[in-house]
Image (cartoon, rainbow, N blue to C red):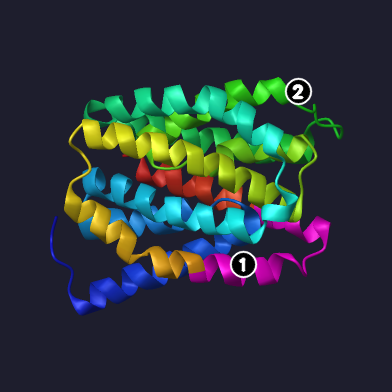
């Protein structure tokens, strides 16, 4: 993994702070901001494990700041499906063709936003046990692509979670997923010590962004909150389409 100069380190650090603040407000989208910067700085194979370490810290801090509003049952069912498939995805990561999956994810995100705007006004509420399947699919793709927060967002929102309850519940579920991914990355020899240290170095900025985002989201009307999520999903979808080449 290449050593970063001061200018590059400042850019990566600034992207980490911005990404964590955005994720603390919308519940996702941080990876869409941070991952392209990490890819330029470190390359794809190093960027995804570094992102996972940094996101583990960021999500843990978001879960802590919103701990009183977490829906623990959702997290439990998510983990039931998420942990085994995160392990499988992590083991596949070293040799997976990422470009096609990335484009597919980008297209899916744009279609989700279109459906939310043009489809039926009453969204189908997923059953509690359905989060085991959501965790399985989301964790598998997350291990391959780095993060799929926008993919999982519609399910958490349709369940009725908003603002702090949504942010905290999704964050804690993602923590469980990231821990399993890191175990698999380590076993697959795609998580060297240098990548762990790089991710940990971004940790204080991820925590600072989570704190700042929590201050923002507490003051947001619910309607504005949902609009921000959809805008973030659209941006992430376009970035994934561009990245998948």
Residue 161 on image: x %, y %: 76, 43
Q: Mainly helix, strand or loop, the magenta region?
A: helix
Residue 242 on image: x %, y %: 40, 46
Highlighted magenta segment, given as a residue range: 208-229
Is 244 situated above or below 95? below
Q: Residue at x 57, y 36 (%)?
A: 151
Q: Which residue is mark 2?
A: 127
Q: Is residue 25 visible?
A: yes
Q: Is residue 175 left or right of residue 232?
A: left
| 242 or 19, nearer to the observer | 19
Residue 35 on image: x %, y %: 37, 53
95 in magenta: no
| 146 or 62, nearer to the observer | 62
Marks 2 and 1, how far apart at CA? 29 Å
Q: Residues within 10 Å of mark 1 (few under 14, many from 20)?
A: many
Q: Identify the image quadrant of the C terminus.
A: top left
Q: Is residue 89 left or right of residue 95?
A: right
Farthest residue to the right: give it: 122
Is 151 situated above or below 64? above
């Amino acid at each position: 993994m290449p050593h970063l100069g001061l200018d590059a380190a400042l850019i990566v650090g600034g992207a980490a702070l911005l990404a964590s603040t955005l994720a603390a407000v919308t519940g996702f989208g941080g990876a869409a901001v941070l991952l392209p910067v990490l890819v330029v700085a470190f390359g794809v194979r190093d960027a995804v494990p570094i992102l996972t370490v940094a996101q583990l810290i960021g999500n843990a801090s978001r879960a802590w700041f919103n701990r009183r509003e977490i829906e623990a049952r959702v997290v439990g069912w998510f983990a039931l499906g998420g942990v085994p498939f995160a392990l499988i995805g992590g083991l596949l990561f070293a040799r997976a063709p990422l470009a096609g999956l990335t484009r597919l994810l980008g297209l899916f995100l744009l279609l989700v936003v279109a459906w939310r705007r043009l489809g039926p006004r009453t969204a189908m509420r997923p059953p509690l046990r359905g989060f085991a399947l959501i965790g399985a699919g989301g964790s598998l793709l997350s291990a391959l692509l780095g993060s799929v927060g926008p993919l999982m967002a519609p399910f958490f929102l349709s369940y009725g979670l908003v603002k702090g309850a949504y942010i905290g519940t999704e964050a804690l579920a993602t923590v469980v997923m990231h821990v399993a991914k890191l175990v698999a990355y380590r076993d697959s020899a795609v998580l060297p010590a240098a990548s762990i240290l790089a991710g940990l170095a971004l940790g204080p900025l991820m925590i600072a962004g989570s704190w700042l985002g929590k201050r923002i989201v507490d003051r947001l009307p619910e309607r504005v909150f949902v609009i921000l999520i959809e805008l973030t999903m659209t941006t992430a979808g376009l970035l994934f389409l561009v990245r998948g080449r």
